[in-house]
Amino acid sequence: MMAEKEKDELEASRDASNIKLAIFLGVVAFGFYLGFIWYYFK
Amino acid sequence: MGYAAVHDDDHHDHKPTGIGRWLFSTNHKDIGTMYLIFALIMFFIGGAMAMVIRAELFQPGLQFVDPGFFNQMTTVHALIMIFGALMPAGVGLANWMIPMMIGAPDMALPRLNNMSFWILPFAFILLLSTLFMEGGAPAGGWTMYPPLTLQLGDAFPFLIFTIHLLGISSILGAINIIATIFNMRAPGMTFMRLPLFVWTWIITAFLLIAAMPVFAGAVTMMLTDKFFATSFFSAAGGGDPVLFQHLFWFFGHPEVYILILPAFGIVSQILPTFARKPLFGYASMVYATAAIAFLSFFVWAHHMFTVGMPLAGELYFMYATMAIAVPTGVKIFNWIATLWKGSMTFETPMLFALAFIVLFTIGGFTGLMMGITPVDFQYHDTYFIVAHFHYVLVPGAIFGVMAGIYFWLPKWTGHMYNETLGKWHFWLSAISVNVLFFPQHFLGLAGMPRRIPDYSVQFADWNMVSSLGGFVFGLSQLLLVVVVIQCVRGGQKATDQVWEGAHGLEWTLPSPPPFHSFTTPPQVTEATAHS
């Protein structure tokens, strides 16, 4: 059984990683979108 | 037994009540349920459109609808079934099962999860509203090729906005799934211990992030062609209409795998359970799935052989398409090897999974036939193509989803479903789906073109047979609704493990699982990881 402190630490580290990963993937997806349009527009 | 009994405190299991529970939900189980109900509603709306199509094609000549409305039906049927029924059904199953399979308390980004779902109803209200507009709904085919689609009436901007909303919803959903699997796995749940369903969803989510923006970009370019005087796809302005086809199919081919890979994952969970044997070749299944997904980005122009390409291009796309048969074959043979000498029983999920293997393989083989360039010149835009992709998507992807629903329904509701009705649903579906789609191979080989409301009399007999199969298939789906409603309302109590041969974290939770499960992560070992 995980101690309460250990559980809180795990949750905090997960939250930070989740947000970082989501922003990274969001930028990649939006970059693809704009990149394709820009490639054919220029 | 059950980790939940050990780890979940009762005071954590309070549920919000009323409409707010659903509108503002951040719970993966509730959001999964909403996705599945939404997909079911869309399945019946898209199915009703298919019934209109088959009724019109029951006999030669125009019977019920004018040709313009017929084209609207074929177009909107496809858009609804692909984006409204199959994709949300897959995401619904992912929402319900992935956190429980990896020992996570919920999805990584629960509020984003809520937003991903609630975009969908608005997107489809926009799309369906076009049926009541002057000029009607989109009628240029789901592929939306310009210049035909640019000739749409008021429906055009609605179509484009719908696609953008669906793209945003899918990408946010994919980001959430990746973040969940990468960051929320329980200690000890290494990547090579993940259940196959989870693996297929990692790969599907990456496909979505790579393919969807290209589609969104292509329709944005079409929007600016229509309203802002650009000429991306207009030959008169120096553009190229064929460019749209390339961009569309660069998205469109991976999209096929976005629809089918989760079904592969479901079948890979079900076969070991009912054969009571571990999945044969787990690692090779993972690598084969990844290989299929990777190759899907390099074969798009096999959809465009007849548009005119250099010979080298046609040869390249032909051989690249053939190459996909290799990892697909690995998966099919691994499934068969899993069954080999297993102690099999044939409950409804197993029946749907077995039918999936046989019938999806038929669709796969006709795909190989069409991958041969000179042969495709004969088949292109005929009913052979319609038969091929319906075999892949109906007894393929939809049977996979059905198998998953029957497999996990006792876990979700806490009750066993009515096995007799489930078997009736399976046998009626399995027989009628073949009566519906198999004759379309003959029609296509005989030269009947697709997307037409009328046809020459020599095609009459097989069209009538196909329509009869369609009506039986459509009606038999009502049995699923009866089974689900009965199961939600009551029935024999399901055990935690539900199925004798089931292994994995999700089966250690009570049936139904508590509103918040795995609030304290379980410790996963090789023995508890997967079957």
Image (cartoon, rainbow, N blue to C red):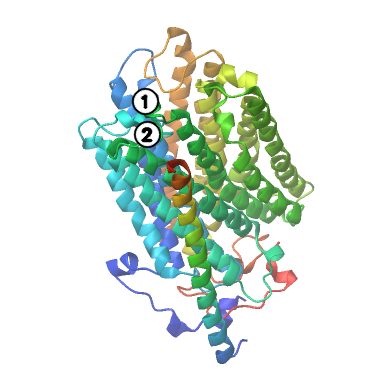
Q: Residues within 10 Å of mark 1 (few under 14, many from 20)?
A: few
Judging by the rendered image, the residue that carries numbered circle 2 is B231
Q: Residue at x 45, y 56 (%)?
A: A30
Judging by the rendered image, the residue that carries numbered circle 1 is B236
Quadrant where the N terminus of chain B lies? bottom right
> Helix or strand or loop: what does disc 1 sit on?
helix
Q: Is residue B87 left or right of residue B337?
A: left
Q: Residues within 10 Å of mark 2 (few under 14, many from 20)?
A: some
Q: Where in the figure is residue B363, as x and y percent of width and height?
A: 60, 32
The answer for which chain carries disc 1 is: B
Q: Is residue B258 left or right of residue B474?
A: right
Residue B86 visible, this angle: no
Q: Nearer the viewer, residue B64 or B193?
A: B193
Residue B410 visible, this angle: yes
Q: What amino acid does circle 2 point to?
A: Ser
Cβ atoms at labels 2 and 1 below 8 Å apart: yes
Q: Where in the figure is residue B389, as x and y percent of width and height?
A: 54, 32
Q: Residue at x 60, y 75 (%)?
A: B2
